[in-house]
């Protein structure tokens, strides 16, 4: 099956010019609109500059009657055959000033608008390795180069408008403060007064702008009826996690999370686990689900939920548990009831695990690991 382009381009492709280029707010994807004067294509690349999605946008000369294999073999972007385009005689080149990139809230896909109207969409399921292109306004028949956008505009139109509204809200100086106040107020009602607060953990900057996502960590110290502290992220739920729609029809129940750990360890030490995880979904273009296991990125002796010495360092990762009562331990607080954008926010509790336990969960499933930990009397409380 012909594809838009794979691997390195040939020397003939060096004449290609970039019309516009934009990087996602999470720095994990880059969208570019490129032309060689004959045709224009949009590409979605990952942080390693590998093309992960693409879509044909327009021919600028008369369309061929069939696929131009010579262009493809030369590493040049494709021309759409006449039967697949609204403009078989070709259309004028795009004016960069009229084009706008709109990133979806998840950061895993984007749309390009021309004079405010949708020109193309490259969603997360556009996959060059499987020959699945994006959606193009000027395409009128499905092909390896494009899917007609007109057929899906009822789905994508509202999503593009919501994405523009979301980023407009994020650009407002008071948006983060308003979200932060709501989240902290929710935890006040569930866990009592706060202690220390860490700002912008795992922060990433974008051209001097505010980091996205912004994530803080709040401490809820021990109380008479709660002999442990709770540390929780604040800010992960401000945006939906990427790629969920690849696996779930209804993303709302799973799309927004915060992470928490219940512990008797010093809060500053235990809280240092969060910068590793706070931006992981958006940096790696993935999502955290209940039961996921995540390996620590460094040596086990540096893992914050371990003991202080190398000889007391059995843990090398975490299990993400949505229901801590599945493991032994003290009374577990209920943190449900917080919503963002009509999506419920789910708190996932961190339970430290060994590398052998992580591999066991990968092989047998997280439910099997949770049953094993429960039989061993392993608590959800970190101490």
Image (cartoon, rainbow, N blue to C red):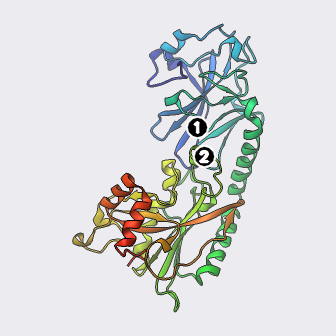
Q: Residue at x 64, y 16 (%)?
A: 80
Residue 282, x across and y down, in percent: 53, 51
**Cα separation between marks 2 and 1:** 8 Å
Whether the residues at callouts 2 and 1 have beta carbons within 8 Å, the answer is yes
Residue 245 bears which disc, if any? 2
| Pick the front one: 289 or 29 | 289
The furthest residue to the bottom:
224
| Pick the front one: 273 or 140 | 140
Residue 338, x across and y down, in percent: 66, 69
Q: Is residue 63 above or below residue 5?
A: above
Q: Residues within 10 Å of mark 1 (few under 14, many from 20)?
A: some
* SS at badge 1: loop
Q: Residues within 10 Å of mark 2 (few under 14, many from 20)?
A: some
Left or right, 372 with reference to 344: left
Residue 168 in view of the camera: yes
Q: Of the two numbered discs 2 and 1 on the same chain, state the one appearing first in sequence.
A: 1
Residue 342, x across and y down, in percent: 72, 60
Left or right, 298 with reference to 258: left
* SS at badge 2: helix
Residue 297 in view of the camera: no
| Pick the front one: 371 or 281 | 371
Q: Is residue 50 above or below residue 88?
A: below
Residue 323, x across and y down, in percent: 52, 69
Quarter assignment of residue 132: top right
Residue identified by numbered label 1: 125
């Amino acid at each position: 099956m012909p594809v838009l382009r794979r691997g390195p381009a040939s020397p003939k492709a060096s004449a290609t010019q970039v019309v516009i280029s934009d990087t996602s707010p999470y720095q994990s994807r880059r969208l570019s609109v490129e032309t060689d004067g004959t045709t224009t294509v949009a590409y979605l690349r990952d942080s390693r500059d590998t093309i992960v999605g693409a879509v044909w946008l327009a021919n600028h000369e008369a369309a061929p009657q069939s696929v131009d294999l010579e262009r493809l073999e030369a590493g040049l972007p494709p021309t759409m055959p006449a039967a697949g385009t609204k403009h078989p005689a070709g259309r004028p080149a795009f004016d960069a000033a009229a084009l706008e990139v709109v990133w979806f809230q998840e950061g895993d896909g984007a749309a390009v608008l021309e004079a405010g109207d949708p020109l193309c969409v490259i969603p997360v399921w556009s996959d060059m390795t499987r020959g699945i292109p994006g959606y193009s306004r000027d395409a009128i028949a499905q092909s390896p180069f494009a899917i007609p956008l007109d057929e899906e505009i009822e789905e994508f139109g509202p999503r593009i408008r919501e994405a523009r509204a979301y980023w407009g809200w994020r650009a407002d100086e008071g948006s983060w403060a308003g979200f932060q106040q709501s989240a902290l107020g929710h935890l006040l009602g569930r866990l009592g007064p706060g202690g220390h607060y860490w700002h912008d953990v795992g922060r990433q900057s974008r051209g001097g702008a505010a980091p996205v996502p912004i994530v803080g960590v709040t401490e809820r110290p021990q109380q008479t009826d709660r002999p442990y502290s709770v540390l929780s992220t604040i800010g992960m739920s401000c945006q939906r996690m990427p790629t969920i729609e690849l696996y779930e029809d209804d993303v709302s129940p799973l799309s927004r999370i915060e992470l928490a750990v219940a512990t008797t360890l010093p809060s500053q030490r235990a809280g240092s686990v969060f910068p590793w995880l706070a931006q992981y979904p958006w940096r790696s273009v993935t999502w955290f689900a209940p039961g996921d296991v995540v390996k620590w990125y460094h040596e086990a002796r540096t893992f914050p939920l371990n003991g202080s010495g190398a000889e007391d360092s059995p843990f090398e990762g975490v299990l993400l548990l949505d229901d801590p009562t599945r493991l032994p331990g003290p009374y577990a607080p209920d943190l449900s009831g917080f919503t963002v954008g009509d999506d419920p926010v789910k708190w996932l509790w961190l339970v430290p695990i060994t590398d052998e336990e992580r591999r066991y969960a990968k092989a047998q499933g997280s439910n099997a690991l949770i049953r094993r930990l429960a039989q061993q009397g392993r608590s959800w409380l970190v101490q």
